[in-house]
Image (cartoon, rainbow, N blue to C red):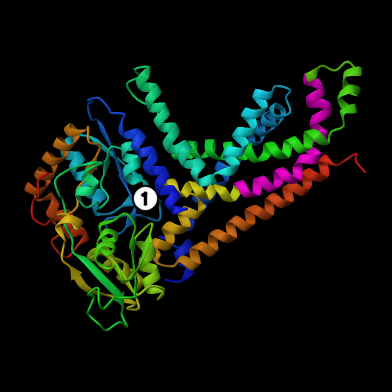
Amino acid sequence: MNWFSLLFGPNGWGGLMLEGAVVTILLAVTSVPFGFGSGLALAVLKLSSNRVVRALCEGFTTFFRGIPDLLSLFIVYFGLQALIDRLSKLFGLSSAIELNAFFAGVIALSVVVAAYSSEVWVAALKAVPRGQHEAAHSLGLDTRKTFFLVLMPQLIRVALPGLGNIWMVLLKDTSLISTLAVIDLLRAASEASKNTTRPILFYSAAAAIYLVFSILSGLVQSNLERRANRGFV
Amino acid sequence: MKTMKLLALLGLASCLMASAASAKEWKTIRVGMDASYAPFESVDPSGKIVGFEVDYANALCERMKVTCTFQNQDWDGIIPALLAGKFDAIFSSMNITDERKKKVMFSDMYYATPIVFAGQASNKSDDVSPAALKGKTIGTQSSTIHANFLEAFYKDSNIKLYPTQDEPNLDLASGRIDYVVGDGLVEADFFEKKGNGCCRVISEIKRVPGIHGPGVGAAMRPEDAELRDMINKAIAEVDADGTYKKLEAKYFKQDIRGKQVTN
């Protein structure tokens, strides 16, 4: 069979690869708001005056930046499931809640992204001059408004390049979920190459799709950066 | 990384062993399999798991009046996932060995196929004794009877272990390794797909009792004795009414049932 019918023929693997690509994107897009959001929260807590809070947050970051991302995924998939089982037994629930692989992937990737992005957010928070807080307060803005209206736009500007980098890494880290037998882009390519014994064709196709995603992300990122930088010279 | 992965899984598995499920009524049986073992189980272009063991498990479930659902799970983590309750039974060409019996409980044996040495087609020598293969590279899937067999008898050869059986097969075809040990039918299926007469089955390996065990069975959590009894009863029924023969003929040209072994 030639490469075209292997990909697009009636029994071709192109469909499965596209479905896999959708899973990859969904996984990344679902994880990123949780990851960046909790990363920011983590960063704010890291700058808190309470020593215990600071130590806990630093510990979290050190742990999840220090272990392989694959291991984080296993901790969530196997470890968290075990915890859920224990708890549901404790409360006498008859049917246990099952953590599916996609959801485990979202949690694990969010945790990893939170750990990495918190450092980016810390740097951004430190880059906003103290005078900005004071000016906002003197205008009568409360803490919430100060944060979202005054600090946030300036934070974003500094944080975007770093966050963009983390997004790119996340996009590729989604492939770790293939070890849980979820058919993402990489897994689809691997199933196809195993079944057809043509690994080069299918892995190249997967590489091309990942590249397209990365290039598109790069374009979106430079647009966002331009937008965030408007008003700054 | 792989060692770490295994250690993590084993560590977690041992914590999970402690949590036991109470007796329950079976309406659905979730089956876990590593779908990279055609023609026994593999993924088709629509993403569905297909193969002999899927049809066979479905036939058993029909007798047990339960619904079977199938989940794909990598071989490395298949026992930990069973123990963690991700599914209820493994139907994944898992040979019944004493080592595995320490962790899981097996059904009766439901198939036994020849185990073989395979090599490149250009390799004309039929001698696969440990002496002849000294210094040669032999590939197979890790955490399998084949890996245990090679580690026990082929210490002077270079043993390469892979996460699935497809990988050593591809490496054999591309000339990266000299020999593969695996299931005779799986090897034959791969060589047929690969075409061009890349490789050949060299000779059959006689099963070593302590290593290979008698054949393949379904694996379950040790506390699910009720499920095992249901499955064993269904295995006998599917044998008796000729369904087994029909399914076997759909996939294979030879008899794979082997002689009955009760667990």
Image quarter where the C terminus of chain B lies is top left
Q: Horizontal and vertical percent for residue A126?
A: 80, 34
Residue A59 versus residue B142 in the image, above or below:
above
Give the prevailing secondary structure in the magenta stretch. Answer: helix
Choose between A59 and B141: the one closer to the eye. Answer: A59
Question: Magenta segment, which residues?
Answer: A144-170
Of B41 and B167, nearer the camera is B167
Residue B224 to residue B58: above or below: above
Which residue is pictured at 58% across the width and 36% down the height?
A: A111
- How many numbered circles are shown? 1
Please say whether residue A221 is one of the residues in the magenta stretch.
Answer: no
Tell me: A27 left or right of B41: right
Viewer-proximal residue, B147 or B244? B147
The residue at the point 57 percent across, 38 percent down is A63
Asked whether residue A30 is in view, the answer is: no
Q: Is residue B170 visible?
A: yes
Amino acid carrying mark 1 in the image: Asp
Q: Residues within 10 Å of mark 1 (few under 14, many from 20)?
A: many
Position of A113 relative to A194 (above/below): above
- Name the image quarter holding residue A156: top right
Horizontally, residue A147 falls left or right of residue B115, namely right
Q: Residue at x 40, y 52 (%)?
A: B46
Element at label 1: helix
Residue A157 among magenta residues: yes
Residue designated by label 1: B76
In the image, is A209 to the left or to the right of A93? right
